[in-house]
Each structure stands twice: as structure tokens, then as C-alpha cells.
């Protein structure tokens, strides 16, 4: 079961509580549903959520999904060093690790996965978007793994942003666009490894 | 009209309770089922219902008893340690032949244990959970959709058979989000001529009690209750089978363990091993007939559980120990991986002991 299944995308998002890890996952789940895929979204919960590490398993598939727990992700999104170190070995061969390079200054250890380093926290801060590093990374993820149209992105945002935070939709959109631009631009740079990023099934 | 949305299992269950016409929720918070109370705290006032956070789990189950006496659909929800506290109430509900809807989103035990998923309350749920001879109808959802559909069914079963219907699930199914289609249909109406609704001095008073000091009368109560239970066993057993047509190795699992097992069965079949899965949807009544039939052609059974081995006893009973049954499990809040289950299947296929 180590091998990738063409029609299934297993995603693990991990970081500190408060970085928007679960929201990141929720976003992908709604995007998957919009594309007509079966989805599961499973948060870590309990003491982990209360100030420590947080992680979130998301599966998108064209078929019925068995276990919702992601043990061997096709894509790992790491937003802190402990998560990067903990989950790097579990990513399946040919998968992708997308990480916040402003918080993680570690050398990639795997030869058989694609690394995508985005200095999301710094990019967000420079753009006056403090707190939107998760959306910068999400933009990069969408560019690599889950192509959506502008209208689809807007539709998902309207579904996942709660009513009392509607005023943040515009900032979310800007952060997403920034992330996508950085991902597209780094295509030829050393920030991305020689392997091609995975596209969602 | 039906609409498909993404919801957490706990929330889908709570919304389905509203759809089932439940307007009385009594509970006390505990992880990992808190979303049920949180959701109903918002929703009940919108539909003119009662959300009440009781002073304790024991108080909450007895509030359910009271509301049920009045002929109303009522529910409570908790997680393992809280269900232990409710066990007195479960016994009184059974002794009074009252319908009730109870949810156990299991966490690891014994004692306060941990807050991660477990299936170690199987004995407690399927054997009644309190003192005296009684059973609960125990429903085991394996998806967010079933959290909703089995809730609707549970309320109906409770009213049809005047007994407790319990959802026995776990933290994973409760916390996970999936697509769910919520049907908004009119809830089934049940006549409750026994309800305590006030005589208005126009009829004889109704009495609902579990106290019968005359042993012959109490014996008759027990006998007629068990005649009703036999009807439940005949009519209400639910089971899903997967890959069982030609299976030599049969996994038996419910809830989250069944989802993990499905991955393992698919992987085993891809490598040419004839494995299959029997998933009990009702844990009581247990699908004994499906197991007994499978024992005709199955060589070996594997009980996949998040416990030290509880359902395995019902499997052995169902097949009269005609075939070997082995346990594949993780406990304490750990969940077996599909690889662990597949490994067990492969060992059995090679004729090795587990």
C-alpha cells in the first residue's frame, strides 16, 4: 500500500496549533467536494490542539474512501520543524513535501520526493498579510496539486470562511494568489527539486 | 428535500436527531463528543426544542427518562467514562420499557483513560450496560452518512420496541468530516398510549415504574421483554458484506476498524488473497446468521478491533467455534494501520499463526 493510487490524493497538513492547519485541510476538502470527489477530513484533536502540534488528514478520491487516516501522504504540508522531521520519512515515493522555508531551515533528506520550499511566513509578512502563511502555502499547493479556476477558488472561500469573518475573504484571495505566483515562479529555481510535482488524480 | 454537505460525524448525528423530531437533549460535555452538545445548543432553540446541560451525566440520563415518560423523543450523548455513569439510568429505562436514544462516542479506557478513539465499550453496550437482564439496540456507524441515517433509524427503533437505541461509535467517526446527504422527511409518528400526559380527571392514571415487588409479576415482565427482544433479533439485524462471495479469510470489524479493514481487504485481493469483510451495523442484535453462513466456506476469521478482544467472543459464539478466530487490534487510543491488518491476512494466507 506504499504505492500511489492514481485516483486518490492523500494529504497531511501539520504544524503548530493556531497556524490554520485545520482550515487548510477544510479548504482542500471543500475544493475536492466541489470537483466531485469523495473526501474525508480528519483533525488531530484533544491535547494536541490545546497549544501543541496540530495535524490534519485529508483524502480526495474518485472512489469510496476506506480509512480516513493518512499514514503515507502523497503530499505533506509542513508548517513547523517538528512536523517536517516527524513526517518527512512517511511521505510515499514520488510524493511532494511543501513547507514553510521561513520556519524550517533543514536540508531535505529524501531523494525520491519533490520538495517545494516557500518562505510563506516571510512572504505573508512582507505583503502585510500576517497570519496568512497557511493561505500562501495553500496557493502553492493548488498550483502544484489541485488546479482550480478563479471562480472555483472564490466559491470554496465563500463556503469555508464563516459569516463573521467575511471581511477576510479578500485577504485570503490575495494570499492564495501570492502563493500560486511564487510556486509558478520558483519552477526554474533551486527552491524546487528536479522531480516534477504531483498532480491530483 | 435532500442536500449534500460536508459535516463532522458528531454534527451530522446531531442534525439527524433534529430531523428525527427529537426536541429534548440532555447532556454533559466530554471529549470526543462535545460537538453534539455544541451543535444542539445552537439548533434546539431554533426549532423550539430544549438543550439542557445537566449537572452530571447521571442527571442527564434521568432527564431523558422523564421526557420519555411524557412520550417525547429524548436523547443524551457522552463518551466512555460518562456512559459508565449513565448505566444506572440505562437499567431503569429498560426496566420501565421506555424508548431512549443514547450516543457513546468511545474513547480509550478503562477509568478516565485517554481521549483518542477506542472500541473497548463493546461488552458494556451489547450486554446492556447496567444491572439486570436487558439489552440495548446497538448501532455502529462507519461513516458520517451513517451517523445521520442510523440516528434516524435509532429513534424509530427505540419507539417501535420501547427500548434504548444506542449509537456506539468512536472519536474518529465523530470527529471526521465527509459528504453527508441529509433527508428532511417528516419523522415517523408513534402512538404512545402509556405516556404520562395528565389525566385531566378523564382517565385512569398511568404508572411507569421499574419496581415490581411480586416476583411472579416481575418474572412475567422479564419474559415479555425478552419476547420483544427476540422480535428485534429477527427483524432488525443489519450487516454489510464486502468481498465475501469467495472469501477464505474473513475479517469482522465495525466502525473505524471496518474502514481500515476495507483497505486491507482491497490490498489483499489485489495480491490474489481471497479476503472479505463482514461489517456488523447492529452490534446487538449481532449478525450471527451472516457469520454462521460465512463459516461454511471461510477458513479463518480475523476480528479487527480497537480493544483487547471483545467482539471476538460474539464471533466465536456465532460460528460455534467451528473455525479459528484471531484478534488483530490496537488499544489505548491507537488505531491499526491497513498494513498491520494486511500483514495478519498474509500470515493467515501462508498458514502461519498470528
Image (cartoon, coloured by chain):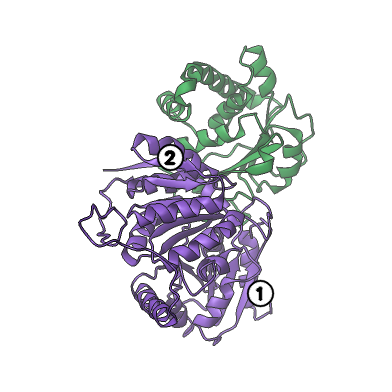
Chain colours: A green, B purple
- Give the left or right position of residue B206, taking residue B10 as reference: left
Q: Quadrant of residue A125?
A: top right
The residue at 54%/23% (across/down) is A176
The residue at 78%/40% (across/down) is A109
User: Which chain is disc 1 placed on?
Assistant: B
Identify the residue under disc 2: A33
Query: From the viewer's perspective, is residue B153 above or below residue B352?
Result: above
Label 1 to label 2: alpha-carbon separation? 38 Å
At numbered mark 1, what does the secondary structure look like: helix, strand or loop? helix
**What numbered label is drawn on residue B301?**
none
The residue at 36%/45% (across/down) is B23
> Marks 1 and 2: same chain?
no
Query: From the viewer's perspective, is residue A150 above or below residue A85?
Result: above
At numbered mark 2, what does the secondary structure look like: helix, strand or loop? helix
- Give the left or right position of residue B10, taking residue B228 as reference: right
Q: Nearer the viewer, residue B185 or A123?
A: B185
Q: Nearer the viewer, residue A184 or B90?
A: B90
Number of other residues with Cα within 10 Å of mark 1, as a class: few under 14, some 14 to 19, many 20 or more: few
Residue A122 position in % (x across, y down) = 69, 18
User: Which chain is disc 2 placed on?
Assistant: A
Residue B163 position in % (x across, y down) = 39, 65
Query: From the viewer's perspective, is residue B160 above or below residue B18?
Result: below
Identify the residue under disc 1: B347
Amino acid at each position: 500500500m506504499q504505492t500511489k493510487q492514481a485516483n486518490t490524493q492523500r494529504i497531511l497538513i501539520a504544524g503548530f496549533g493556531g497556524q490554520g492547519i485545520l482550515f487548510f485541510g477544510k479548504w482542500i476538502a471543500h475544493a475536492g467536494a466541489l470537483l466531485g470527489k469523495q473526501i474525508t477530513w480528519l483533525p488531530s484533536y484533544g491535547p494536541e490542539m490545546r497549544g501543541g502540534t496540530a495535524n490534519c488528514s485529508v483524502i480526495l478520491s474518485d472512489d469510496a474512501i476506506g480509512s480516513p487516516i493518512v499514514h503515507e501522504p502523497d503530499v505533506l504540508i509542513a508548517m513547523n520543524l517538528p512536523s517536517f522531521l516527524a513526517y518527512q520519512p512517511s511521505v510515499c515515493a514520488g510524493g511532494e513535501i511543501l513547507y514553510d522555508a521561513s520556519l524550517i531551515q533543514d536540508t531535505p533528506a529524501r531523494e525520491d520526493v519533490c520538495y517545494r520550499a516557500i518562505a510563506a511566513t516571510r512572504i505573508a509578512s512582507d505583503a502585510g498579510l500576517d497570519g496568512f502563511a497557511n493561505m500562501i502555502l495553500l496557493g502553492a499547493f493548488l498550483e502544484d496539486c489541485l488546479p482550480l479556476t478563479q471562480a472555483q477558488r472564490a466559491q470554496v472561500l465563500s463556503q469555508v470562511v464563516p459569516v463573521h469573518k467575511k471581511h477576510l475573504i479578500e485577504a485570503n484571495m490575495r494570499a492564495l494568489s501570492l502563493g500560486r505566483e511564487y510556486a509558478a515562479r520558483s519552477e526554474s529555481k533551486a527552491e524546487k527539486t528536479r522531480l516534477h510535482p504531483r498532480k491530483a488524480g | 428535500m435532500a442536500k449534500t454537505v460536508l459535516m463532522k460525524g458528531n454534527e451530522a448525528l446531531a442534525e439527524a436527531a433534529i430531523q428525527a423530531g427529537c426536541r429534548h437533549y440532555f447532556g454533559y460535555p466530554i471529549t470526543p463528543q462535545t460537538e453534539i452538545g455544541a451543535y444542539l445548543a445552537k439548533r434546539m432553540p431554533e426549532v423550539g426544542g430544549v438543550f439542557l446541560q445537566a449537572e452530571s451525566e447521571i442527571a442527564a440520563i434521568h432527564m431523558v427518562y422523564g421526557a420519555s415518560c411524557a412520550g417525547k423523543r429524548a436523547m443524551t450523548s457522552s463518551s466512555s467514562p460518562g456512559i459508565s455513569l449513565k448505566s444506572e439510568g440505562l437499567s431503569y429505562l429498560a426496566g420501565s420499557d421506555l424508548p431512549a436514544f443514547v450516543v457513546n462516542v468511545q474513547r480509550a479506557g478503562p477509568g478516565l483513560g485517554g481521549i483518542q478513539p477506542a472500541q473497548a465499550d463493546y461488552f458494556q453496550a451489547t450486554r446492556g450496560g447496567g444491572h439486570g437482564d436487558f439489552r440495548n439496540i446497538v448501532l455502529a456507524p462507519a461513516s458520517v452518512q451513517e451517523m445521520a441515517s442510523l440516528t434516524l433509524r435509532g429513534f424509530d427503533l427505540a419507539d417501535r420496541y420501547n427500548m434504548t437505541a444506542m449509537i456506539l461509535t468512536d472519536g474518529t467517526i465523530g470527529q471526521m468530516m465527509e459528504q453527508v446527504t441529509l433527508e428532511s422527511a417528516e419523522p415517523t409518528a408513534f402512538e404512545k398510549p402509556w405516556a404520562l400526559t395528565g389525566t385531566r380527571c378523564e382517565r385512569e392514571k398511568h404508572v411507569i415504574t421499574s419496581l415490581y415487588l411480586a416476583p411472579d409479576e416481575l418474572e412475567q415482565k422479564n419474559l415479555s421483554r425478552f419476547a420483544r427482544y427476540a422480535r428485534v433479533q429477527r427483524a432488525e439485524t443489519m450487516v454489510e458484506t464486502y468481498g465475501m462471495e469467495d472469501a477464505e479469510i474473513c475479517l469482522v470489524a465495525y466502525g473505524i476498524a471496518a474502514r481500515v479493514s476495507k483497505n486491507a481487504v482491497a490490498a489483499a485481493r489485489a495480491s490474489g488473497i481471497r479476503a472479505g469483510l463482514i461489517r456488523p451495523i447492529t452490534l446487538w442484535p449481532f449478525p450471527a446468521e451472516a457469520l454462521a453462513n460465512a463459516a461454511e466456506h471461510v477458513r479463518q476469521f480475523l476480528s479487527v478491533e480497537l480493544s483487547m478482544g471483545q467482539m471476538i467472543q460474539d464471533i466465536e459464539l456465532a460460528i460455534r467455534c467451528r473455525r479459528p478466530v484471531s484478534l488483530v487490534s490496537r488499544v489505548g487510543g491507537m488505531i491499526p494501520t491497513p498494513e498491520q491488518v494486511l500483514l495478519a491476512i498474509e500470515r493467515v494466507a501462508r498458514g502461519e499463526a498470528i
